[in-house]
Image: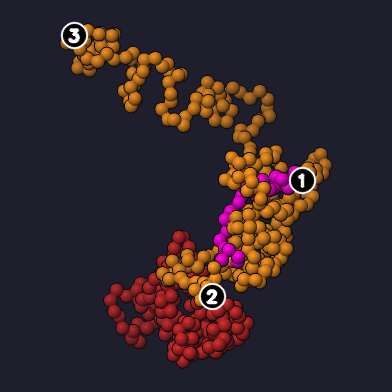
Amino acid sequence: MELIGTLGKLRLAALRLSRGNLHHASKPLTNPTLLRPFSTSPPSLETSPTQRPLRHRDLQTSLLPDLTQIDPVLDHDPSPPSTLDHGKAFRTNRPQSLVFNAPMEDLDESQTPLTSWEMARLLKKSLVVKRVVNMNGKGKQPSMYALVVVGNENGLAGYGEGKDEEASRAVRKATNRAIKNLKYFERYDDRTVYMDIEKKFHATTVFLRSRPPGFGNRSNHIIHEICCCVGIHDISGKVIGSHNPMNVVKATFEALNHQRLPEDIAKMRGKKVLDVQHVYYGAQ
Amino acid sequence: MPRVYDLCARIQNGFRARLRTIAIPDTKMNLAVSNILYHQGFISSVARGNYKAPDEEYTPTTPDNIATRRLWLTLKYRDNEPVLTKMSCISKPSKKITFTVTEMKSMVSGRRAKFVEPLQPGEIAIVSTNYGVLEIHDAMAKNAGGLVLCRAR
C-alpha cells in the first residue's frame, strides 16, 4: 500500500465510495459514468444520455450533425473515384436573392413585419415587364422579367425583380421580393426630399429637387411612380444620361437612400439647426 | 484677382483621401477662407507652421523663412464621413460673378441668381467684400455686396 501515492489513495477512496458504501457517513455518489466534474446541475439517476436535456436550450438533437455518416463536402472521401471524370468538390449555389427565377413561395406574415392586411394595402407598381431570352445549347429559352416597386405612401418603399415563364407569376415574385426589401426613407415635412440630390448610377444620373408645398410630383415617369409609393408629393425630378428603366429605378432608390439630413450636418459641424420655415410660417 | 481654386482643390482632395491634416500655402486669402471654414465648423483648427509640421511655439514670418511657411488645417470627420464633401469656385477668371445684397438674399433662400445654383441646407458661400472676405450671411448683415469666391458643403 505504501507503493501507491496520494493520488492513488484518493482514487481508491473514490472507488470504495462509488461502490455504494452506504455505511459511510458522507453523501452517496452516483454511478461514475454519469459523474461529470464540470457540470453545474447535479446529475440525476433516472435519465440516460439520449434523454438528458442538452446543456444549451437552443440546441436540438435533430439539428446536431450526424457524425456517423461521411459528409461529401466537409469530410475527405477516402475511397478512390469510381470514374475518371471528377465530380464537383464543392456545392455551387448562388444566394437565393440573386436567382430571379427561383420557385415562388407566396409571402406570409411570418416573413415580414407587415400584416397581410397591410401588405394588401401597399401601393404596387410594376415598372418594367419585358421578355428576356436565355440562349442555351437547346435553343432560345424565353421568360418574362418584371421589376416592381412597392410602397406604403408613408416613407416605406422597396423594389424587387422577378423572372418566370409567365408574366403574372414574374410580377408576383417581384412583388414578394420588393416587400422583403422594404426600407424607410426620410422625407422633409412628409412631402418632399430635404435638399436637392444628384446621384449617378452607372450611366444614369438622377436629379431630385426639393420643391415647396403644392408644387406636385413633376418628374420622369419612373421617378414619379417611385415618389408616389414613397409618399413624396412635391418634387422635381430629372434623368440625365441613360434612361434605362431598371437603372433609373436603382438610381432613384440610391439617391433617396443617401440623403444627408440637416440634423446630421448640424451635428457634424457643431451648429444648432433651426427650421425657419416651421418657425416663421407655422407649417404643421 | 483672388485665386481660391488651389485651396478648394487641396481641401477637397484632403477630405477624400481621409487625411488628418493638410498644409496649404500661407497667404492672406488662404488664411481668411480657412478662418471662415473653421468658424462654420468644417475644419477643426488652423495653425501656422513649417512645411514639415505646425509650429510648436510662435515663429515670426521673415524673408528668411517665408518660403517654408504653411497653414496647417486639421480636417473633421464624423461617422466615417467627411464633414466637407465639396468645395468649388463660383467666380472664375473667365467669368467673374459679383452679387448685390438682393442677389445674395435670393441665392441663400433657395432661388438661383445669375446662373449660380442656390445654396442647399448646410451649404455656405464665401464672398470677398469691401469689409474683407466674409461668409455670405455676414456679408448680408453688413449690407455689403461683392465677388462670390467659392461654395462649400
Q: Which chain is red?
A: B
Asked if the magenta segment contains residue A180, the reply would be yes
Residues at marks 3 and 2 touching, judged by CB atoms closer than 8 Å: no
> Which label sits on residue A281?
2
User: In this view of the protein, can residue A220 be seen by the observer?
Assistant: yes
Q: Label 1, label 3: how many angstroms apart (C-alpha)?
A: 88 Å
Which one is nearer the viewer's eye here, B119 or B10?
Answer: B119
Tally the marks.
3
Tags 2 and 1 both on a single chain: yes
Identify the residue under disc 3: A1
Per the image, label 3 sits on a secondary structure element best described as: loop
Residues at marks 2 and 1 touching, judged by CB atoms closer than 8 Å: no
Residue A264 % position (x, y): 47, 65
Residues at marks 1 and 3 touching, judged by CB atoms closer than 8 Å: no
Which one is nearer the viewer's eye here, A58 or A211?
Answer: A211
> Looking at the rendering, in which quadrant would you find the C terminus of chain A?
bottom right
Query: 10 Å neighbourhood of mark 3: few (<14), some, or many (≥20)?
Result: few
Q: Label 3, label 2: how many angstroms apart (C-alpha)?
A: 101 Å
Callout in the foreground (3, 2): 2
Callout in the foreground (1, 3): 1
Identify the residue under disc 1: A168
Q: Colour of chain A?
A: orange
Vertical order, A149 against B108 (above or below): above
The stretch of residues the image draws in magenta is A167-192
Q: Could you tell me which residue is drawn at 59 percent across and 28 percent down? A: A72
**Does label 1 or label 3 sit earlier along the sequence?**
3
- Specify the amino acid type for callout 1: Ser
